[in-house]
Amino acid sequence: MPIHPRLKPLLRALPKNRPWLFTAPPSRKYPQGGHWINTKHLNKDFLKLLTKAGIKAGRKTGGFSIHSLRNSFETVCVNAGIPQRVVDTWLGHRSGRSMASIYYKLSDEDSQKFMLKVPLGIGKLAADASTT
């Protein structure tokens, strides 16, 4: 999986030798924190934040959910000109009806090249942003 150039220094700054990248805060059961995040709790918390911000939340109401972030990422990438099969590979989609889903191979080099095209919230390509 390629890592976006803007994310690399943030990941490098994290403490090493930890079993999880994202961890839950301290709780009664885990007073030291640092344990895995329950995805059901994560989505519930996300929905609460959306509601508090006045944003439509939950699939039943046609609002956002954690899964919406995957959809948004895919849209941003495809709109940036990254081939659909590359995005599908990044998102872990291995099946599909086209033969490309079976035969398409994404090299690490090509994947990193495409990652440089993702305009993560800055309105310009990562390759251009790294020079400013």
Image (cartoon, grey):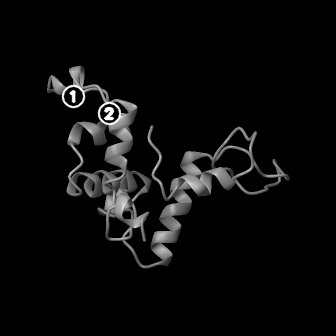
Left/right placement of residue 44 relative to residue 120 reads right
- The amino acid pointed to by label 1 is Gly
C-alpha separation, residue under disc 1 versus residue under disc 2: 8 Å
Kindly state the secondary structure of the residue where label 2 is placed: loop
Q: Which corner quadrant of the image does residue 123 belong to? A: bottom left
> Who's the residue at 23% across and 21% down the image?
102
State the quadrant of the N terminus.
top left
> Who's the residue at 21% across and 57% down the image?
79
Between 90 and 30, the residue placed more toward the observer is: 90
- The amino acid pointed to by label 2 is His
> Who's the residue at 76% across and 39% down the image?
17
Left/right placement of residue 66 relative to residue 84 reads right
Kindly state the secondary structure of the residue where label 1 is placed: loop
Residue that numbered label 1 is attached to: 96
> Up-down: is 91 above or below 62?
above
> Up-down: is 42 above or below 98?
below
Left/right placement of residue 122 relative to residue 24 reads left
Q: Are marks 1 and 2 in contact (CB under 8 Å)?
A: yes
Q: Of all residues shown, which one is farthest toward the front?
A: 131
Between 98 and 45, the residue placed more toward the observer is: 98
**Residue 38 percent across, percent down from the top left:** 61, 46
> Who's the residue at 73% across and 57% down the image?
25
Left/right placement of residue 27 relative to residue 107 reads right
**Residue 39 percent across, percent down from the top left:** 55, 46
**Residue 56 percent across, percent down from the top left:** 36, 70
Residue that numbered label 2 is attached to: 93
> Up-down: is 105 above or below 87?
above
Rendered image: mark on residue 24: none
**Residue 93 percent across, percent down from the top left:** 32, 33
